Image (cartoon, rainbow, N blue to C red):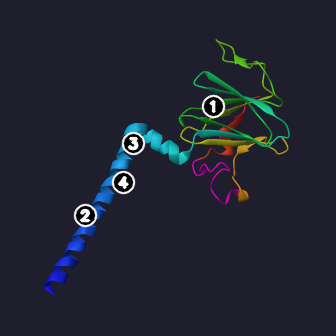
Amino acid sequence: MKKSIVFYEGSIKMKSIKNIVEILSIISLFSAQVAIGGTSGLLKQIQGPGFELFNKASQTISIALIINGKLTTSDVASGQKFVKTVDLKDSIRLGIFDKKTANISTALITGAITPQPDRIYELNASGKTKYVTWNPAKAPYLYPQTGPFMGLTGKTESGYPLGDNLQQSQIILKK
């Protein structure tokens, strides 16, 4: 009888050691993730890329993003999305062309987008994700994404969380 009690106590000790090893492994993996990607890398996995434009227009549009003076352009087909990893502290100037437009650039001194976009927006939402939808069939044309099922999922259609997304008041029409 004593032998079986000792065996039972031994298996409890083995389970405890196994649990401790599992916990240490999890902590080690978390630490490695932070060391490789930093906290911002870990946060990016949680919040997503920071910028997404979903084009619900019936045709392809072109967009021009200016972030910290750097221009990024893209054509976004109808029903498609444009995604860019951004620092949430940055404000974004977004130019939208109602149709596919080639040779988009910025002036060196003024930073003006040429040719002139049909609409220019400032997304001034420091610390917020900027997940927006372009739909000229609605008013306003550019608005925060709501996600599937009228927003009940709390995520974009791409699966990014909407809990820290910008508000309509932070989308400022400049032109």
Looking at the rendered structure, the kind of residue marked 2 is Ile
Could you tell me how far apart the alpha carbons at marks 4 and 2 are, in whole angstroms?
A: 14 Å
Which residue is labeled 3 in the image?
34
Could you tell me how far apart the alpha carbons at marks 4 and 3 are, in whole angstroms?
A: 12 Å
Quadrant position of the C terminus in the picture:
top right
Asked whether 152 falls inside the magenta stretch, the response is: yes
Residue for point 81% across, 44% down? 139
- Residue sitting nearer the eye, 23 or 39: 23
Instruction: Give the mark nearer the N terminus: 3 vs 1.
Output: 3
Label 2 residue SS: helix
Quadrant position of the N terminus in the picture:
bottom left
Crowdedness near tag 4: few (<14), some (14–19) or many (≥20) residues, C-alpha within 10 Å = few
Instruction: Give the mark nearer the N terminus: 4 vs 3.
Output: 4
Looking at the rendered structure, the kind of residue marked 1 is Ile
Looking at the rendered structure, the kind of residue marked 4 is Ile
Tell me the tag on residue 116: none
Q: Position of residue 118 (x, y in %)?
A: 81, 28
Residue 34 in the image: above or below residue 115: below
Q: Quadrant of residue 143?
A: top right
Tell me the tag on residue 26: 4
Which residue is labeled 2 in the image?
17
Which residue is labeled 1 in the image?
92
Q: Position of residue 107 (x, y in %)?
A: 68, 14
Instruction: Give the mark nearer the N terminus: 3 vs 2.
Output: 2
Magenta residues, as a range?
151-164
Label 1 residue SS: strand
